[in-house]
Amino acid sequence: MSGYAKRTDANQREVIAELQAALPEATIVDASSFGKGFPDIVVGLWGANYLVELKDSNKPPSARRLTNSQVSLHANWQGQIAVCTTSTDVVATILRHIRKK
């Protein structure tokens, strides 16, 4: 186990709270402490799981880049994974995947 706390974007708590209010039937897990490039949150809804890396849109683009471990995980992940900046982005991602079914 590492000796330091994982950094989270400033908007993470707000996005999670907004998702809990907008999607009360969803299960939302803060996975930001998992490390190794794993996304910040996992949203379980209607029998599907959505992996979401949250980035803070108030930061400059250079500060919103994926880390090397995130890039590697995104490139090799065989399932759905998204990068979002707001709860609206997360809901839109979920809706796009539902419509594909």
Image: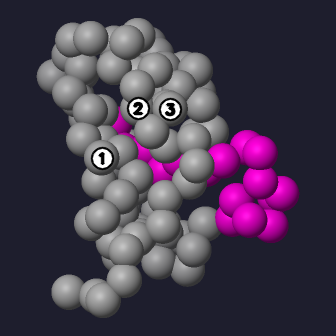
Q: Residue at label 1?
A: 30
Q: Residue at label 2?
A: 16
Q: Please state which amino acid type lies under the numbered disc 3.
A: Glu
55 versus 86 height, above or below? below
Mark 3 vs 1, N-terminal side: 3
Q: Secondary structure at mark 3?
A: helix
The residue drawn where x is 81% and y is 58% is 61
Mark 3 vs mark 1: in front? 3
Q: Is residue 83 visible?
A: no
Q: Residue at label 3?
A: 14
Q: Is residue 13 left or right of residue 32?
A: right
Q: Please state which amino acid type lies under the numbered disc 2.
A: Ile
Residue count near mark 2 (Cα–Cα under 10 Å), binned few <14, some 14–19, many ≥20: many
Q: Which range of residues does the magenta coloring cover? A: 50-65
| Quadrant in which the C terminus is drawn | top left
Q: Are marks 2 and 3 in contact (CB under 8 Å)?
A: yes
Query: Residue 33's spot in the image, x, y percent?
Result: 30, 64
